[in-house]
Image (spheres, grey):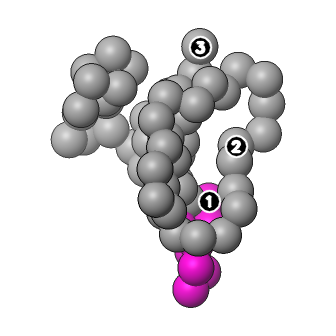
Amino acid sequence: IDVRKQQGIHSRSSIRILAAQANLYSAMVGERICMKLGEASWCPSGREWKLATSGDRYAVWHKE
């Protein structure tokens, strides 16, 4: 929730699905956050993305 607030993400923010597979779901939210769910390896490309948080089968990045 803190990352959403810091990046200005709200209920009407756009969502772009980047991958949807049996072991991976990734999306970009509002052009400011990328997230992935699942056990497959994935991360956004580009140096502007910084890992905000991660855990068991999830990770969230935000633009610096």
Q: Tell which of 41 and 28 is nearer to you.
A: 41
Q: Which residue is mark 3?
A: 64
Question: Which element type, helix, strand or loop, lies under badge 2?
Answer: loop
Give, as a three-letter code, the residue at label 1: Leu
Name the residue at 62% across, 25% down.
Answer: 50
Furthest toward the front, the residue is 56
**Residue 18: assigned label:** 1
**Identity of the residue drawn at 33% across and 38% down:** 13
Camera-side residue of 15 and 61:
61
Q: Earlier in the sequence, mark 1 or mark 2?
A: 1
Q: Amino acid at mark 2?
A: Pro
Q: Is residue 50 left or right of residue 54?
A: right
Report the front residue among 4 and 54. Answer: 54
Q: Is residue 18 a member of the stretch shown in magenta?
A: yes
Counting residues from the start of the chain, the first of labels 3 and 1 encountered is 1
**SS for tag 1?**
strand
The residue that label 2 is drawn on is 44
For the magenta stretch, what is the residue range?
17-25
Q: Is residue 53 above or below residue 16?
A: above
Of residues 54 and 50, the one drawn nearer to the viewer in this rendering? 54
| Magenta-span inclusion, residue 47 | no
Please, what secondary structure does the residue beneath circle 3 have? loop
Q: Is residue 52 visible?
A: yes
Location of residue 55 in the rendering, given as x and y in whole percent from the top left corner: 46, 50
User: Is 58 situated above or below 32?
Assistant: below
Of circles 1 and 2, the one toward us is 2
Across and down, in percent, residue 12 comes to 24, 40
Query: What quarter of the picture does the C terminus occupy?
Result: top right
